[in-house]
Image (spheres, helix red, strand yellow):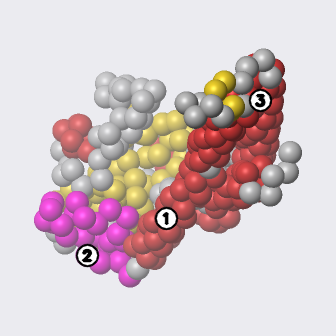
Amino acid sequence: MFCSSMASLKSVLAHSARVFSICRKQTTVIYIKRTLLLSRLPLFKRADGRLIDSVRQSSSTAVKAEKGEDSFLKWFLLLIPATTFGLGTWQVKRRQWKLQLIYELKRLTTAEPIPLPLNPDELNHLEYRRVRVRGQYDHSQELYILPRSPVDPEKEAREAGRLSSSAETGANVITPFRCTDLGITILVNRGYVPRQKIRPETRMKGQVEKEMEVVGVVRLTEIRKPFVPNNDVERNHWHYRDLEAMSRVTGAEPIFIDAEYGSTIPGGPIGGQTRVTLRNEHMQYIITWYGLCAATSYMWFAKFIKKIV
């Protein structure tokens, strides 16, 4: 990304230099043409009999016109540093907004867990909030969101905002969870399993049926993104969280939580599969735009103020 930004900077600087050069050449050509034309103009008499040098008068008019053109070009080219300065300032504000959003996500995902509320309106404002539930899994109605790659919490923290891919793929196992203290069944993303462990019989050690406590973060339904396949309900292949459809299939409430890594059952899916990192490359954009502003401002100053040609 930084290399791309530097390439953009060099491109704009080169383009600006070409513009200044062309404008300078055009001004010189216009001046030469006017000089050749004005040298052929005759003298003429005023009403009082005095002679007036038409060449000198026309030359004065040409100089004024040339100054007017230079003035227009001068202020027009000032738009380049002014625009890049505005874009850099906008990126500063965007970075502040992104940092605040990252802070809020971190605060929600590290706060003390609260009991799961049943009010849908309250849940809609609690995404990424840690909650605690107690009950039993119903392994007979597992759902699979795939393909998925495992989330490494430490790696996610180190590489926050970077696009990365993993050679390993598998699925996230979604299991109905009967909350004994609330009297409802919700959906719990137990975590990641590799492709060879998707079938329940390949991980029987983790298919426990005893009552347990699960801590996780609230997740809301997803809207299918472009190029993401539709969910295949019949084959039990899900590609995004459609809580209404998942609830119809399992009979659970449209309430969904991602189990934390600490809720992982040995031999079962690996919890902690919530991606809470956000892309934050605004500092590179800030450097790029302010760098362009500084460079083009100097070129403008050199051309029109210091008269360096």
Examine the structure image and report whether residue 198 is included in the region drawn in magenta: no
Q: Please name the residue shown 74% across and 57% down the image.
A: 305
Region in magenta: 112-133
Name the amino acid type tagged 2.
Pro
Looking at this view, is 93 or 115 the one in front? Answer: 93
Question: Can the viewer see residue 116?
Answer: yes
On the image, the x and y values in percent for residue 55 come to: 73, 28
SS state under label 3: helix
Select label 1 or label 3 by which is in front.
3
Characterize the local packing of mark 1: few (<14), some (14-19) or many (20 or more) Cα atoms within 10 angstroms.
Answer: few
Look at the image and tell me in which quarter the C terminus lies: top right
SS state under label 2: strand
SS state under label 1: helix
Which residue is labeled 1 in the image? 93
In three-dimensional space, the C-alpha distance between marks 2 and 1, rounded to whole angstroms, equals: 36 Å
Say whether disc 1 or disc 3 marks the residue closer to the N-terminus.
3
Q: Looking at the rendered structure, which numbered label has been put on residue 115?
A: 2
Examine the structure image and report whether residue 131 is included in the region drawn in magenta: yes
Is 268 rendered above or below residue 67?
Answer: below
In three-dimensional space, the C-alpha distance between marks 2 and 3, rounded to whole angstroms, equals: 82 Å
Q: Please name the residue shown 19% across and 38% down the image.
A: 248
Question: Residue 214 sits in which quadrant?
Answer: bottom left
Question: Residue 57 sits in which quadrant?
Answer: top right
Say whether disc 2 or disc 3 marks the residue closer to the N-terminus.
3
Looking at this view, is 77 or 219 the one in front? Answer: 77
Q: Is residue 210 left or right of residue 153?
A: left
For the residues bearing labels 2 and 3, Cβ distance under 8 angstroms: no
Q: Is residue 300 left or right of residue 234?
A: right
Q: Looking at the rendered structure, which numbered label has been put on residue 272?
A: none
Which residue is labeled 3 in the image? 31
Q: Tell which residue pokes out farthest to the front in this image.
A: 49
